[in-house]
Image (cartoon, rainbow, N blue to C red):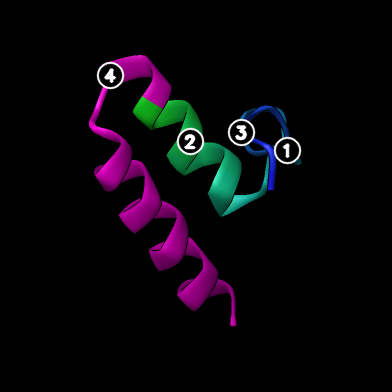
Amino acid sequence: MPLTLMLTGPAGSGKSTAAGAWAARGTSPRALIDAVLADRRAAL
């Protein structure tokens, strides 16, 4: 999924929240991947 889609996803989306938080604090790409995977697991 494109990063822009993750950043601008639905307001209620865990992925957009994680990506937005990552962008705000400049976390490493690995942390972003972990956050997205955690959100995907939580959504299942």
How far apart are labels 2 and 4 at the CA level?
10 Å
Q: Earlier in the sequence, mark 1 or mark 2?
A: 1
Question: SS class of the residue under badge 4?
Answer: loop
Foreground of the two, 3 or 44: 3
How far apart are labels 2 and 3 at the CA level?
8 Å
Q: Residues within 10 Å of mark 1 (few under 14, many from 20)?
A: some
The image's mark for residue 3 is 3
Magenta span: chief secondary structure? helix
Rendering coords of residue 34 (x, y %): 32, 57
Give the residue type that dot 2 points to. Answer: Ala
Give the residue type that dot 3 points to. Answer: Leu
Q: Residue at x 55, y 52 (%)?
A: 14
Q: Earlier in the sequence, mark 1 or mark 4?
A: 1
Rendering coords of residue 40 (x, y %): 53, 68
Residue 37 picture quarter: bottom left
Rendering coords of residue 4 (x, y %): 68, 27
How far apart are labels 1 and 3 at the CA level?
10 Å
The image's mark for residue 9 is 1
Q: Which residue is mark 2?
A: 19
Report the label total.
4
Q: Which residue is mark 4?
A: 26
Q: Residue at x 64, y 38 (%)?
A: 6
